[in-house]
Image (cartoon, coloured by chain):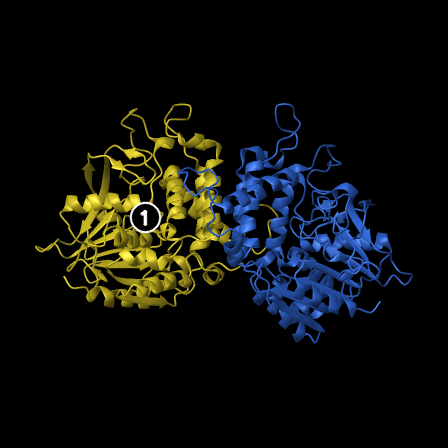
Chain colours: A blue, B yellow
Amino acid sequence: MKHSAGLVAPQSADFAEALTLKSGVRLPGFSLTFETYGELNAAKSNAVLVCHALSGSHHVAGFYDPKRKKETQGWWDNLVGPGKPLDTRRFFVVGVNNLGGCHGSTGPVSPNPETGRPYGADFPLVTIEDWVAAQARLSDFLGIDTWAAVIGGSLGGMQALEWTLAYPERVRHGIVIASTPRLSAQNIAFNEVARQAILSDPDFHGGNYYEQGDDGQGVIPRKGLRLARMVGHITYLSDDQMAEKFGRRTRNHKRSFNYDVEFEIESYLRYQGDKFAEIFDANTYLLTTRALDYFDPALDYDGDLQRAFRRAKADFFVASFTTDWRFAPEKSREIVYALLHNGLNVSYAEIDCPAGHDSFLLDDQHYHAALDAYLQGIKL
Amino acid sequence: MKHSAGLVAPQSADFAEALTLKSGVRLPGFSLTFETYGELNAAKSNAVLVCHALSGSHHVAGFYDPKRKKETQGWWDNLVGPGKPLDTRRFFVVGVNNLGGCHGSTGPVSPNPETGRPYGADFPLVTIEDWVAAQARLSDFLGIDTWAAVIGGSLGGMQALEWTLAYPERVRHGIVIASTPRLSAQNIAFNEVARQAILSDPDFHGGNYYEQGDDGQGVIPRKGLRLARMVGHITYLSDDQMAEKFGRRTRNHKRSFNYDVEFEIESYLRYQGDKFAEIFDANTYLLTTRALDYFDPALDYDGDLQRAFRRAKADFFVASFTTDWRFAPEKSREIVYALLHNGLNVSYAEIDCPAGHDSFLLDDQHYHAALDAYLQGIKL
């Protein structure tokens, strides 16, 4: 039987020591918001770190409000909990909001210790390497020398991969889902459109929008964020699934001959865009897309992924989805091939799921069965 | 030997009689800007109408300035001219700017006869059916009872298709390239993002931006148009071609850790967006994307394309490109299948060209050879 991880609450860890980022910028101390599910065993051998993707957070599973369980549920609740693939009766699972995020960890909205006002545009660009370095500090804080597994989908998968390269001794299993070893030109192009939408929004104020407005209470570059999310959403769904879910269905039989919502897909995109603009921070969106663009573990190896992966020691589970055109199976196969070249123990599942890139978030039967089988095989 | 159609100049035709649009709105008189190449024969049997796509115009071939031939060249110059597939020694070729366009024909920027000021937001939404009805008026004006062929790519292909349905007696060959019988949910989604970018630009002023600004000289919703074009461009190119043309190439080896242009694909998209915002009208962009969304010849036939095409009498040449993910070959096959079902004479070429949707504009050898072979077979 599957159960919920139950009522959970976020925690915070403060790190006083400065962190020198990949850009060379020195970030003076920071804090990370995290959550845990299950219990760390005496040998500290059952810890699993869940890395989040663009719109995720530390709130992976369980709920915040017993009266509003569904609305306050974690983003990977279908995967994490008692009896679920990441079984919290067996694993101690940790979710963490990334550095530069907007869900509690130090980020652009946090006060800049130098000025006492929000960092805004002065928050430094962080990379996936920086995120992993910050997560390593959290591991120390939690007393976890070695993760049984580091797992993530999409951008989270890149972090899992980076963990196995940056800290090969500290992660036993890398679980990389719906991910890619580096963005394609098309991937970067979509990110660039999203960034330009935000950067060109008059309410962006060069990133310092937190104290703008007539009353100095801050404004939101809502139009830009909304467009960024809309264009993102198109790439998260498959063409086929969009056709099935929305097709050419219209609100009314008669055409309205204006630019109001006419087709259901328009309504869906606007809703998703509006909702996102309410809850997400524009500066975090910008730096996250840049972190995605920059990630390229093979860059220092003349683009050779096989050489880049020579450092890795973990076992791997890699999964991709046939209808994912954002990070197509071909990209996962590149990862698998380069890992195998280095004699590593790799399981790979190419899942036939209609939901496109977003499949990694869904409770697809074959996907969860494959992941469950792999996770059960992890020795504690 | 292939030659240029040479120095050309646009002409204009005025139509005093009102046109009742598909929306029911009555457009009081209008004018169309057009160009011609070659000569109409005595039997008036050699006329070919070229319909343009989103960013095209009546300026199909030849040039406007002998000193700036390349810069002032028509958009399908590689196809139209002496010795080219649409050979102007044999055919009388006509290009026309669509109603609602921004290259001379009556459109949002034209004066509204009721007010003497630019139509702006009051210019009615036009459909592909309306465009074809207006083009039929131009045919009368030119004394052309029957077109030897009506040809177009993408949105232009939809017009060619509509011609064969609305005026089956007036077109002998329908040539439909890189097109689709109706947009998919994903197609509409991309259009919607583009529209929202324009509609939410503060400089859009609800469509009445022509007389805004401090001096009343007008402003341009540049940011919105730019974003619309950027997102459009991503869909015009194939993933593979983008990878080949731009890949992950950066301007500098060292990362800049900011949001300036870093990858070449960013530079390309910004350039395309900026250039487009200088020359194109935002209201025309909006109404053109809506015309695309609305086109659905099977709508009145319960979605049944075979029944919808029962009216058609023309012969057809249909072409698609393997790497076109905007209007994939599958969509052209739907057209071909439904035409064949009605016993029509259909040639179909599925061209293996790496350039994605934009292939229809390029001088691909196999594409032009197939088109040339078909056009040579047209009896005059």
Q: In this view, does B227 lie above or below A149?
A: above
Question: Based on the displayed image, in which of its 4 quarters is residue B9 positioned?
Answer: top left
Q: What quarter of the picture does the C terminus of chain B occupy?
A: bottom left
Please state the total of marks drawn on the protein image.
1
Q: What residue type is labelled 1?
A: Gly
Please report the residue visible at 31 percent of the width from the left and 65 percent of the height from the top: B340
Of residues A15 and B350, the one nearer the viewer is B350
Q: Is residue A124 above or below residue B341?
A: above
Of residues A265 and B105, the one nearer the viewer is A265
| Residue B263 visible, this orientation | no
Residue position marked by numbered label 1 in the rendering: B56
| Residue B28 visible, this orientation | yes
Question: Residue B104: horizontal and vertical position, in percent?
Answer: 27, 39
Give the secondary structure at mark 1.
loop
Please report the residue visible at 41 percent of the width from the left and 34 percent of the height from the top: B220
Residue farthest toward the left in the current orientation of the protein: B42
Q: What quarter of the picture does the N terminus of chain B occupy?
A: bottom left
Question: Residue A131: horizontal and vertical position, in percent?
Answer: 72, 52
Of residues A306 and B222, the one nearer the viewer is B222
Label 1 chain ID: B
Please report the residue visible at 47 percent of the width from the left and 63 percent of the height from the top: B240
Question: Residue B328: horizontal and vertical position, in percent?
Answer: 42, 61
Residue farthest toward the right in the current orientation of the protein: A42
Q: Is residue A140 left or right of residue A294?
A: right
Q: Is residue B260 above or below residue B239?
A: above
